[in-house]
Image (cartoon, rainbow, N blue to C red):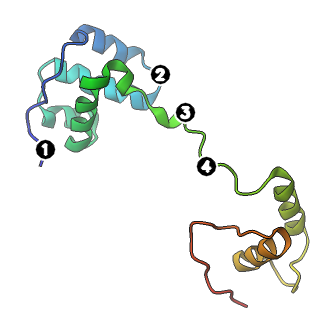
Amino acid sequence: MYPSLVPKLYPRLSQAEALLRYKTARDPVEKIRWQAISLALEGKTMDEIAQATLPSKRWVYMVLKRFNPLGPEGLADYRHRNPGQRPKHTPEEQVRVLRALQGSPPDGGLWTGPKLRDWVERELGNGLYSAHPRAPASA
């Protein structure tokens, strides 16, 4: 599916510079991406790069293709910059849920996922899980 030959890399930096960035990178994802670039600039094939770096040929191909338009900035691992989804409930609502969980559920017994979901809907007026369909409540 992916070619054995490396996509043509635009000469943004030398193989020695790429190797230095590989050796000095602190982020493990960025480090392996620099290793792939360094090996590509050294003239290695896609198979050789994938074998040396462990990811698949597809991964190597995507890293090399991203390097052309974005250069070194394209090798950064942006997952660390993603703050994630906003919490569904306010800090005050989260405290209410934690306090409720320290006691017994309204019907006695132990807390279960469905019992917690029902309590949150009843007490806070909104659901716990917005992306998932509601599972039938069990006794």
Q: For the residues marked 1 and 4, what is the alpha-carbon distance in whole angstroms?
A: 34 Å
Q: For the residues marked 4 and 2, what is the alpha-carbon distance in whole angstroms?
A: 26 Å
Instruction: Give how far across and how far down residue 124 sits, in percent.
Output: 82, 68
Q: For the residues marked 1 and 3, what is the alpha-carbon distance in whole angstroms?
A: 30 Å
Q: For the residues marked 1 and 2, what is the alpha-carbon distance in whole angstroms?
A: 29 Å
Label 2's element? loop
Res. 120 mark: none
Among the 4 quarters of the image, the one containing residue 66 = top left
Residue under pointer 2 = 26
Q: For the residues marked 4 and 3, what is the alpha-carbon distance in whole angstroms?
A: 12 Å
Residue under pointer 1 = 2
Ranked by sequence position, the earlier of labels 4 and 2 is 2
Tell me the quarter of the image containing the C terminus: bottom right
Residue under pointer 3 = 81
Ranked by sequence position, the earlier of labels 1 and 2 is 1
Q: Tell us which disc is closer to us: 3 or 2.
A: 3
- Residue visible at 71% across and 70% down? 127
Residue under pointer 4 = 85
Ranked by sequence position, the earlier of labels 1 and 3 is 1
Look at label 3 and name its amino acid: Arg
In the displayed structure, would residue 100 be above or below residue 43?
below
Q: Residues within 10 Å of mark 1 (few under 14, many from 20)?
A: few
Q: Residues within 10 Å of mark 3 (few under 14, many from 20)?
A: few
Look at label 2 and name its amino acid: Arg
Ranked by sequence position, the earlier of labels 3 and 2 is 2
Look at label 4 and name its amino acid: Gln
Q: Is 60 displayed left or right of 46 in the figure? A: right
- Residue visible at 73% across and 74% down? 117
